[in-house]
Image (spheres, helix red, strand yellow):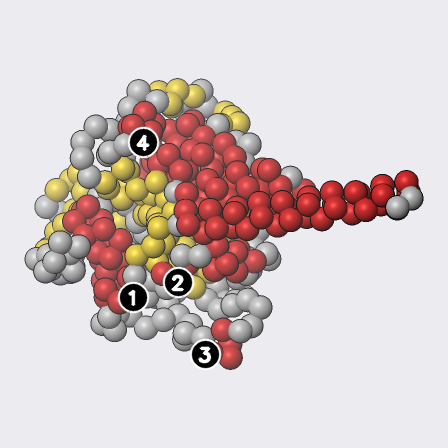
Amino acid sequence: MGGRAKVLRVTGLAVAGALLLGIAAAGWAYWHLNDNITSVDINSALGDDRPARATPAPSASAAAAPRDTGALNILVLGSDSRGGAENQALGGGDSEGARSDTAMVVHLDAGRTSATVVSIPRDTLVERPSCPLASGGSSAHAYQAMFNTAYALGGPVCAVKTAEALTEVRMDHYIEIDFSGFARLVDALGGVTVTTDQDIDDDKSHLHLDAGTHHLDGEQALGLARTRYGIAGGSDLARIELQQKLVKALLKQVSTTDLLTDPAQLYRVADAVTGSLTTDTGLDSLGELIGLGQSLDGLAADDTRTVTMPVVPAPSDANRVVPEEPDARKLWESLR
């Protein structure tokens, strides 16, 4: 074999080997990201006694379409895990169990070019329906229960059932992200820029900021999402305002970060997202999450409206709130 032919053969083998290694690495990465996701079969647990879907379930032929762009409602919870060293180090506390201290209904309009994010105050007193329990049996029907007790009692299934009872809106999907995962996501995106209107001095959320514009790392962004006692009034409604600012800032950060040109950063972001998620079974694969993301190509941060469910102080407890009617009902009707 001539010298040139030998060089070409060796080069070809090297290229083939590199391609095989690349394919193997890509396959492992896909498997790892897919395996990261935790899911709950909410549809089977709740059955058919639920509000109607905003958009009928796709037929077999429609499911083969490149992407679904119908209207969609997603219950998004931020879980305050009380166990685990990482979550505790980030301000999760030292008691057992978990709470849904952040609750938002994300409504995607038909066409997916605009969205409404509605925050539900955790201290809202609601009628909590009987929920199936993981240990077997069902919980008791409860009146004047705090909204976030549903998750503490019966996990995602009870959270969805209680949200649907409150809003009469079908939750097409469920997404939950935990504290430590949220911090890792922000770090993977390179931080997030947020402007605060007042000083924040909160030892409990580990956050101390002067009023103004700040580029926050993951731990600081998480502190902003959690802070309550370090801001004027110390109310859950004030915290929700900061959370809504953070949502918009994250959307802008994602839209300005060209992840496709940096595979390493893309993997870090994907690993942070999938590793911290619990979803319903309709979003429990990387392919389904990618499909949802692709359907939002035309959605910009400026096209996302953030609001809080209208509430008033509860007559029975000044430290709690109840939906303000008829405004709350009209808001939920607009999302059906």
Spatial separation of the CA atoms under disc 3 and disc 4: 41 Å
Give the farthest residue toward the left. Answer: 140
Q: Nearer the viewer, residue 27 or 322?
A: 27
Residue 49, quarter of the rendered image: bottom left
Instruction: Decide which of tag 4 and tag 2 comes sooner along the chain.
Output: 4
Q: Which mark is residue 59?
A: 3
Up the image or down, 22 lies above or below 127; here it is: above
Q: Are the two marked residues, 2 and 1, in contact with CB atoms closer than 8 angstroms?
A: yes
Could you tell me which secondary element the residue under label 4 belongs to?
A: helix
Residue in the foreground of this view, choosing between 145 and 241: 145
Q: Residues within 10 Å of mark 2 (few under 14, many from 20)?
A: some
Q: Are marks 1 and 3 in contact (CB under 8 Å)?
A: no
The answer to the question of whether label 3 and label 4 lie on touching residues, with beta carbons closer than 8 A, is no
Residue labelled with disc 4? 87
- Residue wearing tag 1: 43
Give the mark nearer the N terminus: 1 vs 4.
1
Q: Amino acid at mark 4?
A: Asn
Residue at which label 2 appears: 282
Reply above or below: 211 against 308: above
Inspect this view and state whether residue 92 appears: no
CA gap between label 1 and label 4 equals 29 Å
- Is 142 situated left or right of 23 in this image? left
- Residue 23 seen from this side: yes
In three-dimensional space, the C-alpha distance between marks 2 and 1, rounded to whole angstroms, equals 9 Å
Q: Position of residue 184 (x, y in %)?
A: 45, 34
